[in-house]
Image (cartoon, helix red, strand yellow):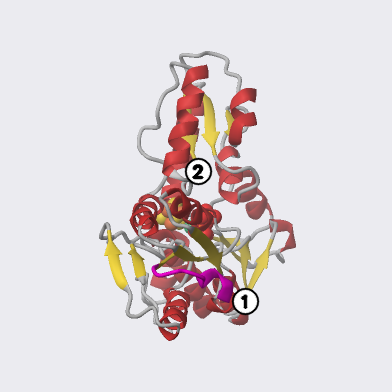
Amino acid sequence: MLLAAPRGYCAGVDRAVIAVEKALDHYGAPVYVRKEIVHNKHVVTGLEERGAIFVNEVDEVPEGSVLVFSAHGVSPAVVKASEARGLNTIDATCPLVTKVHREVQRFAQEEYDILLIGHEGHEEVEGTAGEAPDHVQLIDGKDGIANAQVKDPKKVIWLSQTTLSVDETMETVLKLREKFPTLQNPPSDDICYATQNRQVAIKKVGAESDLVLVVGSANSSNTVRLVEVALEAGAKAAYRIDYASEIQEQWFEGVETVGVSSGASAPEELVDQVLEYLADKGYGAPIEITTAEEDVQFSLPKELRKDLKSAGQDTSNKVKRS
Ligand code: 0CG
Ligand code: SF4
C-alpha cells in the first residue's frame, strides 16, 4: 500500500471549514453558506447536521442573516447582492483564489484580453470571470481555443483556475500560443501549491501502483484531476471514492500494489477508513511516499476575526475536531 503525501486538506479548505464551524459556535445556527463551502459531501453533510444551511444564491437567505461565501470565491455581483440584502457576510474565499481575482482586475484595467483556462460551470471560474466579464474569455477545451479572439495581440494574457492539471494546462498554453504568439504568462502560478503538490505525489505513487484510490467528491476539480494524473503516470486503474464503502471487490483482481491519495477537500478520517479496508484485505501497512512538506496556514476571514475578537474569543484558525 502506497500513501501519497501531501494529500487531503489544503490551507484554504481548512480555513473555510473552520470559519463555518466557528461561525456556528459564535452566532448560533442557522449560518447560511453560499454553495458548498468546499466540494466534499461528508464535510457538507457534517456542517448541515450542526446547523449550516447551504443555498445556491443570495436571494434564498433571509435578510439580516449570517452568510458565508465558499472557498471557491464569488463575483462582485454576488457581493453587491448580499450587501443589498443586508446580510452579515463572512468571506471564506481562499486567499489564493483572491490572488487570481486581483490579477483579473489588474489586467482588465490595463485593457488586456484575459484567457482564463478553467472548467465551465465551476464556481471558481464564475467568480473569477465575474471580476471583468468584458475582458475574460473562458478557455475550456479545444473549442475554447478555437473560439478565442483578441483585440490587440500585444495585450493578451492567460490566467487559470487554481485546481487544474498542471501538465494539461501547459499543453493548452502551448496551443494558445500557436494562435497568439505574444501571449503573456501570469505574474505567478495560478494553479495553487496544494494542487501542484498533490499531483507530484500522485504521479510517483501512480507510476508504481496497479490500482489507485483517490478520496474526494465528484464535483471536486482537484480530486478528479488526481485520478487523471494517476492514470497518466502509469497506474493501471484509478477510481475516485467518497467513502470506503464505495470500493468494489472486482477492482482488486491481479492487484499487488494499491496507491491512495485524497483531494484538497477530503477529511483525513475518510482516508483512514480506506486504509483500514485495505489492511483488512491484506495490503499491509501503508508506505508513505512524500514529495513535499507543507506548512501553509491562512488566518480566518477578517469579518469573523473581528467579531470573535470583540467578544473576547479565540481568533486562531484552530478547532478541536472529534
Ligand atoms: O477542487 P475544487 O476547486 O473543485 O474545490 P474543492 O472544494 O474540492 O477543494 C479546494 C477548494 C476550495
Ligand atoms: Fe486554496 Fe488551493 Fe486549497 Fe483551492 S485548492 S482552497 S486555491 S489552497
Apparent side of residue 89 relative to residue 275 in the rendered image (left or right): right
Q: Is residue 71 visible?
A: no
Circle 1 crowding by C-alpha within 10 Å: few under 14, some 14–19, many from 20 = some
* Figure quadrant of the N terminus: bottom left
- Residue at 44% from the left image edge and 79% from the top image edge: 278
Up/down of 177 relative to 49, above or below? above
Q: Which residues are magenta?
A: 247-257
Residue behind mark 2: 161
In the picture, the disc for residue 48 is: 1
The three-letter amino acid code for the residue at tag 1 is Glu
Q: Ligand 2 quadrant?
A: bottom left
Q: Quadrant of residue 260?
A: bottom left
Circle 2 crowding by C-alpha within 10 Å: few under 14, some 14–19, many from 20 = many
Disc 2 C-beta below 8 A from ligand 1: yes
Closer to us: mark 2 or mark 1?
2
The three-letter amino acid code for the residue at tag 2 is Gln
